[in-house]
Image (cartoon, helix red, strand yellow):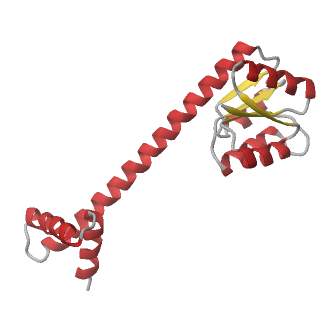
Amino acid sequence: MLILIAEDESLIRMGLKSMLEGLGHEVIAAANGREAIRMADRHRPDLAILDIRMPYTDGLQAARAIAAARPLPILLLTAYSDADLVDRASDLPIHGYLVKPILPEELGAAVTVAAKRFAESRAMADRMAQLEADLAARKLIDRAKGRLMQTGLSEEDAYRAIQTRARRERQSLIDAARDILVSLTP
């Protein structure tokens, strides 16, 4: 994966970069949150690891901006584990919270879990969007069917009329239903 790390302490940044490269990842590094946002936009990383406390733009603000521009798995990194930071971080679209110092095996596990959870949440969101689209289409077809039934057709004949129009006009059932609704609207 291409991983963006943002850490203002150069020794920690170099250590993280070395660990991630040792795990087989390509790494780009930023020294602050503002730079991380620019790099995320330019390089489109697969995952981001952001220190919470950085100059200019902190990791919480950077996580919010990066996720809003293009969702990706984000891990927050901090030397502080106080309840306020954890609470503020939990309101963000992040996929993990790491407390320094970090061991390579912990980092590898966190990256793997974050990437998998992100992929699962994206798949679920895609599935939900498809179900919503299917429901909207079904409602539209049912409305057209209902309007046709008001003209004296049975439910079966009304549905068949929508299908026939779709075939004849070489269009989807949804488009045929939409056209029928427009043509039958007084």
Q: Position of residue 16 (x, y in %)?
A: 81, 23
Quadrant housing residue 136: bottom left
- 118 or 26, nearer to the observer: 26
Give the residue displayed 47% in from the left and 39% down from the top: 123
Quadrant housing residue 141: bottom left
Q: Position of residue 144 (x, y in %)?
A: 23, 69
- 73 or 97, nearer to the observer: 73
Give the residue displayed 33% in from the left and 54% down from the top: 135
Residue 16 horizontal side relative to residue 147, left or right: right
Residue 31 visible in the current orientation = yes
Residue 86 visible in the current orientation = no
Give the residue displayed 42% in from the left and 45% down from the top: 128
Q: Position of residue 91 (x, y in %)?
A: 67, 39
Is 20 located above or below residue 153 in the figure?
Answer: above
Q: Quadrant of the C terminus?
A: bottom left
Residue 104 horizontal side relative to residue 11, left or right: left
Is 153 located above or below residue 114 in the figure?
Answer: below
Give the residue displayed 19% in from the left and 66% down from the top: 167
